[in-house]
Image (cartoon, grey):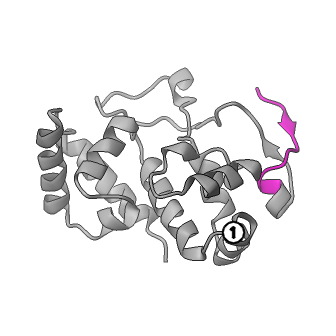
Amino acid sequence: MPKRTPHKGPEAVFGGTVQRAEWPTDHCTVASSAGRHRTEQEARATVPPITELTRIEPVHLERLEAQGVFTTGLLLEVSETPTRRQYLSDQVDATPNDVLAWRDEALMLNLAGFREDEHQLMLQAGIEGLRDILALDLPEFRARLAGAARELNMAAPPDLVVEGWWEQARTLEEE
């Protein structure tokens, strides 16, 4: 188990000690795109790094990393409330709208069973973040992903997986 150590990261912005490991641990079991459940060892899935975000300028990426925000999970944590988003935007010299855009994409990247291929599929479908999923009804979401899969010459995700992402997006919808 990784030791808990203070470092220049979210606690530098918000106070406290954060568990520091090369890749944060996801302690829940999630269904993969293939429909099987991962073992406990596999459930130590990586939280996507912030370098997976496509709507972030390199200068802001460097500033987030300097603040200790290396993963989308940490980004979601340090941008959880409007006050935190404002503080983070001040710390990295970005706008609150920039932080909201990063958060929107980070929420999508953290959907169950979501990996790099699925991210590429979503981008091909014109879906850049959670808000884009929320703007679609399920049949349209399914159709957009199927069309993008054809364009990328890859198999479309199973209907059950697509429906799971769509429902999870609604669960994660922020007010």
Q: Quadrant of the N terminus?
A: top right
- Is 110 situated above or below 83? above
In x, y percent, where is residue 139?
13, 60
Q: Is residue 66 left or right of residue 56?
A: right
Q: Can the viewer see residue 116?
A: yes
Vertical placement of 73 versus 175: above or below?
Answer: above
Q: Residue at x 45, y 62 (%)?
A: 172
Image-quadrant location for residue 113? top left
Residue drawn at the location 82% of the way across and 55% of the way down: 11
The part of the image, by quadrant, that contains residue 129 is bottom left
* Residue holding disc 1: 93
User: Is residue 68 something one can see in this rendering?
Assistant: no
- Farthest residue in the front direction? 59
Give me the residue at 62% from left, 52% from top: 61
Q: Position of residue 165 (x, y in %)?
A: 33, 51
Q: Which residues are magenta?
A: 1-11
Q: Secondary structure at mark 1?
A: loop
Q: Which residue is nearer to you in this view: 37 or 88?
A: 88
Is the stretch drawn in magenta largely helix, strand or loop?
A: loop
Q: Taking 12 as reference, is 67 left or right?
A: left
Query: Is-magenta flag for residue 37?
Result: no
Image coordinates for residue 41, horizontal then vertical, percent: 56, 21
Callout 1: 10 Å neighbours few (<14), some, many (20+)? some
Amino acid of disc 1: Asp
- Give percent across and percent down for residue 56: 52, 57
Q: Residue at x 54, y 57 (%)?
A: 57
Q: Nearer the viewer, residue 136 or 91?
A: 91
How many marks can you see?
1
